Amino acid sequence: MDIATIIGLTLSTVAVFGGFMFEGGKIEAVLQPTAAIIIGGGTIGTLFVQFPMEHIIACAKGLKNALMPPKYPLAKTIADIVSYAQKARREGVVSLESDASASKNTFLKKALSLAVDGTESRLIREAMEVEIQVLTEEGEAGAKVMEAGGGYAPTIGILGAVLGLIHVMENINDPAKLGSGIAVAFVATVYGVFLANVIFLPLGSKLKMRNGEAVLQYELILMGVLGIVDGENPRIIEQKLTGFLGEHGHHQNKAKA
């Protein structure tokens, strides 16, 4: 569970609506099912119109990673690859067949399997870079869906406000119905802005960061396996891969941009 995401969402929600209540407002005033249906349904509907289903699915997978992020133990991955390099240096690359089968990392398993099969490093690079490209595009697709939602939600909120005002005008002679109509109008705008700036846009940035972490690990694995295939000294491989640990924080910041 990503504690930072949970804390952020909770703190933002409490700050916005708690501040409203602190000023004497009643929570019932902002709990408007009609406004929620208009904003939530309208925004999600526009996303389905703009993006193909595979992008929506990629976004759903990304949201799962945002709340329950997979762990990318780069230090352990480096240690495993160096161990494989030492074994390959002693017994040959073919000796890594059992290690490839036992690996729980699908990318590492595929790269090692190609190496064990005697595939040239150039062909391994070409094949695995396709995997990296697919992962990158999938992560970017999910982030784009969230960012688009951040753009649509406030606009749909304005639409909900206009609909609420139309309802008010229709009942201008019935004071009993004016309050609810005006409430829906204003709350719709609040929901739209809230969803955009607290949910969609921040989570879109988080998806970019998570995808950057996954791509970084894939690149590390590819470099390590290519070093093994090329017969590089395990110490040289370790020095190369250790550089990824220093770039980890920089890569995350770049992914947020």
Image: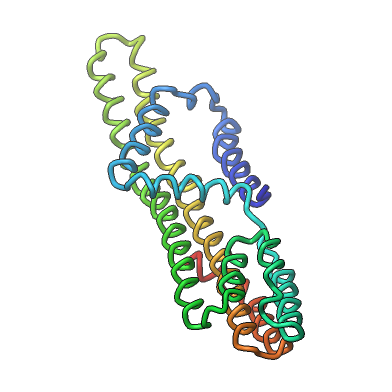
Compare residues 94 and 191 and report the one nearer the observer.
94
Q: Residue at point 59% right, 41% down?
A: 15
Relative to 15, 87 lies left or right: right
Look at the image and name its color scheme: rainbow
Q: Is residue 101 left or right of residue 186?
A: right
Q: Give whichever of 91, 251 is nearer the camera.
A: 91
> Compared with residue 114, is residue 165 higher up or lower down, i.e. above or below?
above
Q: Position of residue 34 (x, y in %)?
A: 39, 23
Give the residue drawn at x 37%, y 38%: 44
> Dividing the picture into quarters, in which one does residue 73 lie?
bottom right
Rendered view: 66 above or below 251: above
In percent of width and height, residue 255 lies at 50, 67
Kindly indicate the quadrant of the structure image that contains residue 77: bottom right
Image location of residue 18, percent across then percent down: 60, 35
Residue found 62% across the figure and 44% down from its top: 11
Of 248 and 80, which appears nearest the observer? 80
Residue ID at (29%, 46%): 50
- Residue 90 lies, with reference to residue 190, above or below; the image says below
Of residues 249 and 112, the one drawn nearer to the viewer in this rendering: 112
Residue 176: image x %, image y %? 36, 9
Residue 208 lies left or right of residue 104; in this view the side is left
Count of labels shown? 0
